[in-house]
Amino acid sequence: MEVATFETSATWGLTSIVDLRNADEVGRRAGDPDSTSPVGVPVRLVPTEDQSNADFRAACLPILDSPEYWLHNVRILPELIRRALEAMAGAGPHAHPTSDRQSSWTNEEVESWLGEVETFVREFADRTETTLGQLRVDETTRAHLRSLLTQP
């Protein structure tokens, strides 16, 4: 996030940053805007992928830029997904850094990608309760996640 974005986010109560990227994806890349985490706002690194895992590499790397890999990620690395959900649920108002694999895409690339993946996203969303059960996410965490998504 840019410095100005951090400053603006203070007005809506940003209290933490939950970074879902892999450790090797963290940090400024060529072309990224200047960015410094604001003082007093902790950044918690909670990756959802383990690219050293052979099963993950075999199933997910060929489709990593598509939500097609989400169900495989849940199946292969459920503990990482659960930890990320727990971190988000316990973080209060938070943000996720946008310097991910897709952040350098143009608007046209994003629109094209969204058109291609909508079916997968809807199918995954329709399975939310099943997936949360598979991940053994407790009811308290589910309630916190629900409130983050539905409360102003």
Image: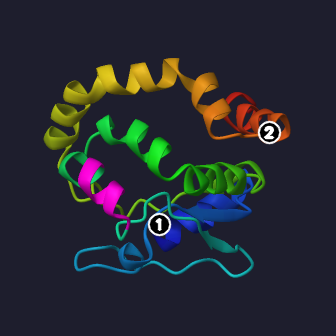
Q: Amino acid at mark 1?
A: Met
The question of residue 19 being in magenta is answered with: no
Q: Which is nearer the eye, 65 or 51?
A: 51
66 left or right of 4 in image: left
**What residue is pinned by disc 1?**
1
Disc marking residue 147: none
Classify mark 1: helix, strand or loop. Answer: loop
Query: Bounds of the magenta span?
Result: 53-59
Residues at marks 2 and 1 touching, judged by CB atoms closer than 8 Å: no
**Is residue 89 left or right of 126 when viewed as pictured?**
right
Q: Position of residue 124 (x, y in %)?
A: 45, 26
Q: Name the residue rendered at 30%, 73% in the picture.
A: 32
| Quadrant (top left, top right, bottom left, bottom right) of the C terminus | top right
The local secondary structure at tag 2 comes to loop
Of the two numbered discs 2 and 1 in the rendering, the one whose residue sits closer to the viewer: 2
The image shows residue 112 at horizontal and vertical percentages of 15, 33
Q: Is residue 137 left or right of residue 80?
A: right
Say which of 64 and 28 sits in front: 64
Rendered residue at 49%/43% (across/down): 74
Kind of residue sitting beneath label 2: Asp
Q: CA distance from mark 2 to mark 1?
A: 31 Å
Q: Residues within 10 Å of mark 1 (few under 14, many from 20)?
A: some
When the figure is inspected, residue 61 is found, relative to residue 119, above or below; the finding is below
Residue annotated with mark 2: 138
Q: Is residue 57 magenta?
A: yes
Q: Position of residue 8 (x, y in %)?
A: 60, 60
**Which residue is at 44% across, 77% downward?**
23
